[in-house]
Amino acid sequence: MVYKFGENPRHNRYKIYRYRTLIITVIISMLITTRIFLVHSNLIVSANPFNKNKAASHKKSKIGKSTASIITKNIKKKNINLTQSPDKISAVSNISGCSMFSAPHLGLADSQIPELRKLAQYEKLCGGSLAEKSSFFTYLPTSMSEAVSASSEMTSRLNLYSKYGIEPLIFLEPVNSDGKNIDLVQLKNGSYDQFLDSFFSSLKINGITSETIGEWVILPEGNTPAWSTSDPSVFSAGVTKIAQYQKKYFPGSLSSIMLESQTYLPNQSWGDGNYTSLRPYIETIPKGLIDSFGLQGFPWASAANQGGEKYYDPAVYLRADLAIEAANTLGVKNIWYNTGTFNKMYTQNASSTITASSAERQFILSGVIKQLSYIKSQGYTAELHIFAQNKSNTSEDIDWSYWKDQPDLADKNTAIFVAFVHDLKSAQIPLWLFDTDAKD
């Protein structure tokens, strides 16, 4: 039998199928177009941690020496999105205890070391040894007399850490004993070689071993204006030189580097940094010399009298893709973050002061855990160093702490820290800590 088109049942099925296919194609096209519009309108952010949107430039000084300074001011703002607005979080949720650690270290409260005395408060709060590493800062000897005094001071400190059974994390900054920046080009060219050799050899002579010397973070923040230069070749040469002297005398010890998430090339000022590949700073460092890679990033808010914009998304200022690329370049599988959350900023001017709510701090800390959990899911170890010192009475003008004099669970900031430690432990992410009761 002969049918006209449309009369044959098979043709009808074909027509229905053709129209249905057309309708589906139109709907998909509309959905794609809508998403592109939203992305380019900065209305949504992908949950992928490799989000390429730039946040505000987080200007800060070196984290360092005895003051361990972190400063944020005169920010050059850039576009940013939040995966969730912390302003919409109205209450602290999921407060859990942190009593899930081995017994606390005895005698810390009476230690000669201010970082260990402060650590005693954290251990009392959680009823156990919550931090796997406790950090402090030191200088680079630029004379034989500095090498002698530095090795003596370091020996005493390392022996006390060993006495309490606590692993130290040492930030070796490119400053002299007076806190003044050294010339990193001179370091590269060998001007300080004999002092570095004397320093590490003296530690060995004094009885320090690869097990007690701790992990050394060499020339931290080398891609920022904190030091004499942020030239990639100068940085990598300096790191290589220092790590080689360290492992000459302590072959089983650990060396690490930590870079800021935003890179500032030479002659760039604070506020002009960009989220870009960190490879230029590390690609010439010999494989096997460095044991871990650290990425630094901090939340920021503008002053209350300057709009009070808030930049709180760790997916932006702690980019997992940058950390993973850097670790791959170095040939390491160990990644750690250095970050914190502020209680108040611009503390010395009431009209400028910004206070982060406990809910906002919880939002940030939860985001950090998400970033590190993603790194773990990619086959790397992930660890977290928290900077938690109150710097409100110094030029830094920022309070990074979670309590005033003593921990108080009635204070939501303390409660947030407890919940965070619990969640971090549950995620199997080790905690490292910097805080001190020293008065800067």
Image (tube, rainbow, N blue to C red):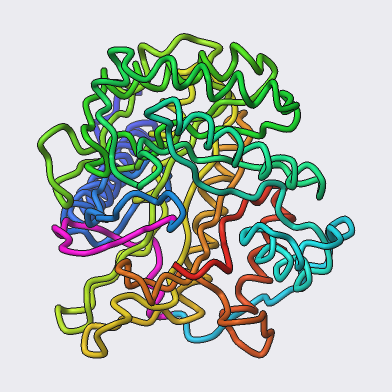
In magenta, the rendered stretch is 68-88
Q: Residue at x 41, y 15 (%)?
A: 193
Image location (x, y in percent) of residue 93 = 62, 79
Image location (x, y in percent) of residue 106 = 86, 61
Whether residue 320 is situated above or below residue 80 in the rendered picture: above
Q: Residue at x 52, y 15 (%)?
A: 245
Image location (x, y in percent) of residue 226 = 27, 44
User: On the rendered image, what quadrant is the N terminus found in?
Assistant: top left
Number of marks in picture: 0
Image location (x, y in percent) of residue 59 = 25, 55
Q: Of residues 421 and 127, which is closer to you in this image?
A: 127
From the viewer's perspective, tell me whether residue 312 is left or right of residue 269: right
From the viewer's perspective, tell me whether residue 43 is left or right of residue 192: left
Q: Residue at x 61, y 87 (%)?
A: 411
**Residue at the far left in the pictured view:** 267
**Residue at the far front in the pictured view:** 145
Based on the picture, tell me whether residue 390 belongs to the magenta stretch: no
Whether residue 73 is situated above or below residue 218 in the rendered picture: below
From the viewer's perspective, tell me whether residue 396 is left or right of residue 323: left
Quarter assignment of residue 8:
top left
Whether residue 237 is situated above or below residue 296 in the rendered picture: above
From the viewer's perspective, tell me whether residue 392 is left or right of residue 358: left
Whether residue 10 is situated above or below residue 163 in the rendered picture: above
User: On the rendered image, what quadrant is the C terminus found in?
Assistant: bottom left
Q: Residue at x 24, y 85 (%)?
A: 349
Our reading of the magenta stretch's main secondary structure is: loop
Q: Of residues 135 and 285, which is closer to you in this image?
A: 135
Q: Of residues 28 and 79, which is closer to you in this image?
A: 79
